[in-house]
Image: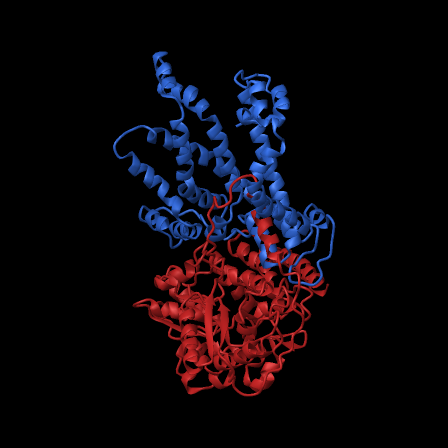
Amino acid sequence: MAGTATAPASTGGRRRGRDTDGSSDVVPGAVRSPTAASPVTAYLFLAPYLVLFTLFVLAPILYGLWISLHDWDFLLPGKPFVGLQNYVDLFTPGSVTSGPFWASMRATAIFTVLSVPLLVALPLLVAVPLARKFPGRNFFRAIIFAPYVLGVAVIGILWRYLLDPNVGVLASVLDRVGLDSPPWLTDTPWVWGALVIPTIWWTLGYNMVIFLAGLQDISRELYEAAEMDGASSFQQFRNVTLPGLRPVLVFVVTITLLASANLFGQSYIITQGQPGRETRSAIMQIAEEGLARFNMGSSAAMSTILTLCLLLISLVMLSSTRERGAK
Amino acid sequence: MSNPLRTVSSLPLSRRGVLGMGAALGVGAAVSACGGGSAGTPGGQSATIAEGAYEGEKVTLAFWNGFTGGDGAYMKQMIESFNSEHDNIEVQMNTLEWADFYSKVPNAVASGAGPDIAAMHVDQVGTNAARRVIMPLDEFTGAMDLNEDDFASTVWNAGMYDGKRYAIPLDVHPLGFYYNTKLLQQGGITEPPQDRESWEAALTGMKSKGVEYPFWATATWPAHLIFISLLGQFGGSLYDEEATQATFASDAGVEALTWYASHVKDGFSPANVANDAQAQAFRQGRDAMTWDGIWMMNEWAKVEGLEWGAAPLPTIGDEPAVWASSHQLTVMQQKSPDENKLHAARDFLAYLSENSIEWAKSGQVPARNSVRESDEFAGLEVQSTLAGQLENVIFPPTIPGIGDVTAPTFEQAVNTVVLGKADAKTALEDAAKKADALLEDNRQKYSA
């Protein structure tokens, strides 16, 4: 992921200093010569992207930060500057915004912790056999990927009617064998199942496809060598597949983490935040604050905090895997 | 899904729609995008429009609403008739889910891409008036020769904000009491119960004759509307007169909620009824009695073989009271008011109001007295039965932001109590504290 080979020459000196493992093919002189021109060149090449990045990513982020420092309703004449008050409120127990916000952060955290390991492990378990060549594998791949093309509204209503403890399909099946359905939609801990299970069913195929692509990149020869050494298929998985997939694995964990932290539709439709407001996600709370109560200032402050949390987690993850890579 | 108030999500969200490190900023970006290009708030406009029907050049009016269910077809029908009767006015209708509607319309109006006319719920009128999304209509009503005598007074007064008229009421939609005739008979009940005694007799009567659950007490929509009705029946109210304080945690509130939740405890309702399950059960003939919006009547009518009737809500407390809402017709603020359009809009609103008998068929009670008292309306059995509750309806006060106080406060309290996770007194008191803070927050925001 470090991408040392493509380092522009302007930073070549520093790069060399840091990459002490010294991949010998990066010859300083060879890199320096074409860029004797100007350090601006790289930025000129980047310019088209930078324009879009500034316009659609950087500017909205900065504008969002600016909004978070105000009592901001875009339709009201007064948008008083309040400094960090929106943030202070969020960290003051008992304020209008802090209780609901941290409760929703907690719900998002629970969902993320429950869903991410399963959303990484299960697609991998499915991808390994489906990477082999056998008749009908495209059929299986297609079937597993299929739910991913559905919208969240569709899968939400579908699972709601499957899981409803009184009028749902599952309840009716259980009833026939004399069992009661658990309160999937209204009581803890069942509600978490009603959020996590449909999410796995829905998005498993996406991670599977990424793993399939990653598996193709692992050289056959490594497996052959391992076999020669008498490694069992589990040992091959443990010592060839997993290390070979490391960069892909890091990528999958990161995007799954971010996607899970953006939970909205499932709890909006399947559990409707029940019981009480226990399964309301952070995004639901942010949307309600900003787009229903039109308090864009505190809503933007909530977004910022959520972003910082996710940035922090992602950085910890990325740096921990980089260290291992350097071993 | 003909429920006109329900906020069923249709957000076309893809879970991976936004990836990468900046994903969480999506909302921040969305929020900030709203601010773009709308720095200028339209000032107070006053419309001086000529008397009589609009006779100028052809204009097109955009009419937005949230009639996404069966009700949309009726509205479309009325618009088609209006268009065919007016050569120089063309009304174009645009329908969004109500939840999207209330967040999108203000943006659209601010950026000059909004509708000319919109229908909205009565509890949103104050918010949209304060945020200058809609304009005062006093000139309109003068020219249309409308006044309080033409409407049910509660619903007419609900369109006022800050001493000015912002909305013309189209309809009133109260809760109603629906019953399954067969199951009632099975329990030996000949008349739909109308007071506490007969209600409880009906429950035990049916239960003893094999109706497992005679009244499915849902923990979600419309449980909080049932609560508002019962609260009024026991002599309580949601807020004090100025809406500065929540008063729903009163003895009346506790009694109302305890009574409603007792159906679960006493085994007359299954536990964990959520997300439309009670409506589903009523369709399937498993739920004998249900309290739901008047608009649900067309849903029941669709079910083949379901024998059902409608009656006013039984009076469980001391006096009759029932929750209701109302669709109100509003005209949007325009950056540069177009007199022709405003004139045409006035004709259209007058037409909708005068011809609201068509609208009544979608499961509504017309707000206009002349329509409600017509023979044709008397012929609509369910609607006219439930219209009998009109003098007892409870509307929320028309103050800005009031619609947003509901969900995080007493709606949540009702949910947890019905699910058996809290007792009524504690839950309502907690919710009232939250509501007080939110009301105070709104007051500061809208007075600035």
Residue displayed at 55% across by 82% down:
B151
Q: Quadrant of the N terminus of chain B?
A: bottom left
Farthest residue, direction left: A135
Which residue is more in the foreground, B228 or B41?
A: B41
Residue displayed at 57% across by 49% down:
B27
Residue A280: horizontal and vertical position, in percent? Answer: 54, 49
Q: Is B180 situated left or right of A39 in this image?
A: left
Residue B437: horizontal and vertical position, in percent? Answer: 68, 58
Q: Is A86 situated left or right of B344 in this image?
A: right
In this picture, is B287 found above or below B344?
above
- The number of discs equals 0
Which residue is more in the foreground, A80 or B113?
A: B113
In this picture, is A272 found above or below B40?
above
Residue B73: horizontal and vertical position, in percent? Answer: 40, 71
Farthest residue, direction front: A37
Residue B448 visible here:
yes
Q: Colour of chain B?
A: red
Q: Colour of chain A?
A: blue
Residue A219: horizontal and vertical position, in percent? Answer: 39, 21
Residue displayed at 37% across by 14% down:
A225
Which residue is more in the foreground, B219 or A196?
A: A196
Residue B234 visible here:
no
Q: Quadrant of the C terminus of chain B?
A: bottom right
